[in-house]
Image: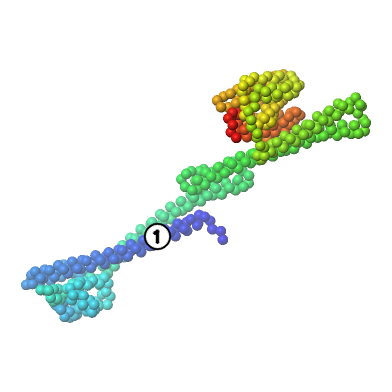
Amino acid sequence: MKVKYLYQQLVSHFSVIVIAFLLLSLLFSHYIEQFVYANKTEELQTYGQSILRDIQQDQRSSDRILKSYGQVLNGRDIQYSLFDENSAIIYSTGIKTPLISLSEKEWHDIKNGQPVTVKQDFKRFNEAVTFVLLPYVQNNRFVGGILLTSPIKGSREVISQMNTYLLITTFIALTISLLLSWILSTFHVRRIKRLQDATSAVAQGDYSVRIPSSDFDEIGELAGDFNEMVEKLDASMEEIENLENRRRQFMADVSHELRTPLTTIRGMIEGLKNNMIPESEKEKGLQLATNETLRLIRLVNENLDYEKIRSNQVTLFKQDIQLVELLEIIKDQLDGVAAERNNEIFVAVDPNILVFADYDRLTQILINITKNSIQFTDNGRIYLRGYMSNTNCIIEIEDTGIGIDPDDVEKIWGRFYKAIVSRTTNPYGEFGLGLSIVKSLVMMHNGAIDVTSEKGKGTKFTLSFPVQNEN
């Protein structure tokens, strides 16, 4: 059976409040009853002691004293009787029997000089009373005592009135408590309901939902944790969506890029097989097939490199490398590629600068970035620079090409990102994996890479490598 949380809260709060008030009411009622009877017995003892003291001080006027006290106590609904050592009544304002009816224990206590108090007695008198027995001693000898009685109904009226006030107070307090419990429970249930609705929205794919949070209580902290979770989910889903879009684009690029060289190679093989290619064109055809084969190998290797780097399967062998020699080698390798787009490569570096890195991987990094600069530059210049800054070796690769849109600067490190989708026939980095590999390799060297670009004016990559041996 499903029970709403609001009702659970109300029942639990109200149950606790009712039990607490019942316990407090019972304890308070018992305390009031004890207090009233204790106060009554104390009053009777005080009057009894006063009567016995006055009689002892003036025995000649004892009758007058007894009558005077009788008048006073009668107005307070208190009766008293004097009795001798044989329990025979000497003087009484209320009891008409000739003897005082006492139990053996009561008689024993009073003979030993101990007062006897009974809060409620329903049998020995004509009505239910509270009574006090005080011993009367002369010359250290028990000669009798005094009995003072007061009807219980007076005390009961006081107790009943107090209980009535207590009941009214309890009812008012319970009403207010129930109202407050309802308000608080409704407030908390609404907060939980917001969490529930937000959770349902997230389950249906809406990651834009947010809940007001606070540090006031655990629910507020839970709302903050929920918002943080949704933000991470939103970022994750956005990344997944981007990856899915990249995957689709990747598959399309793969199909296109692999189909072209494979078609060329197949056509060349079929031509050679069927003697459809003249002897004068065979050398050129074989070279074309070789170039396309190398291109396929490059495509596969580029993907394999990325997977190795991502799974930490690459081991670096760092050494001090003469930077000027490395940059000159890269210039020599890429001058032909740059010339195809009417570009020139310039090297500016101090001959004494050393960079501490893995030679093969650093070469891969610099070639990748330089080819990327060549790809997006026509009739321009590419600058390869190197200098020292504190304890870092700085390498700059700057071009005068088309630049990168400001919105795309941070996206260029994505695995499948390509600045211009239509440029799928470039000789390196066909699938947009190049810069992603570059950044991973730089990070493995404990280095840093940064890019600045201005649309239409060019792009500059800045790489920083620590010079000290960290192995």
Residue 269, quarter of picture = top right
Residue at the right extreme of this rendering: 275
- How many residues crowd around disc 1 within 10 Å: few (fewer than 14), some, or many (20 or more)? few
Q: Is residue 113 above or below residue 327?
A: below
Front-lying residue, 463 or 416: 463
Note whether residue 121 is visible.
yes
The quarter of the picture where residue 181 lies is: bottom left
Q: x%, y% of residue 51?
A: 14, 69
Q: Camera-side residue: 436 or 366?
A: 366
Q: Secondary structure at mark 1?
A: helix
Q: Note whether 352 is above or below 424 in the view shown.
A: above
Question: Quick check: 433 left or right of 28?
Answer: right
**Residue 42 x %, y %:** 22, 66
Task: Please state which of residues 465 and 264 is positioned toward the viewer in this rendering.
Answer: 465
Q: Position of residue 316 (x, y in %)?
A: 65, 35
> Where does label 1 land, which residue?
20
Left or right of 55, for residue 430: right
* The N terminus: image quadrant: bottom right
Identify residue type, mark 1.
Ala
Residue 174 sits in quarter: bottom left
Which residue is at a point 64% across and 32% down the rendered structure image? 318
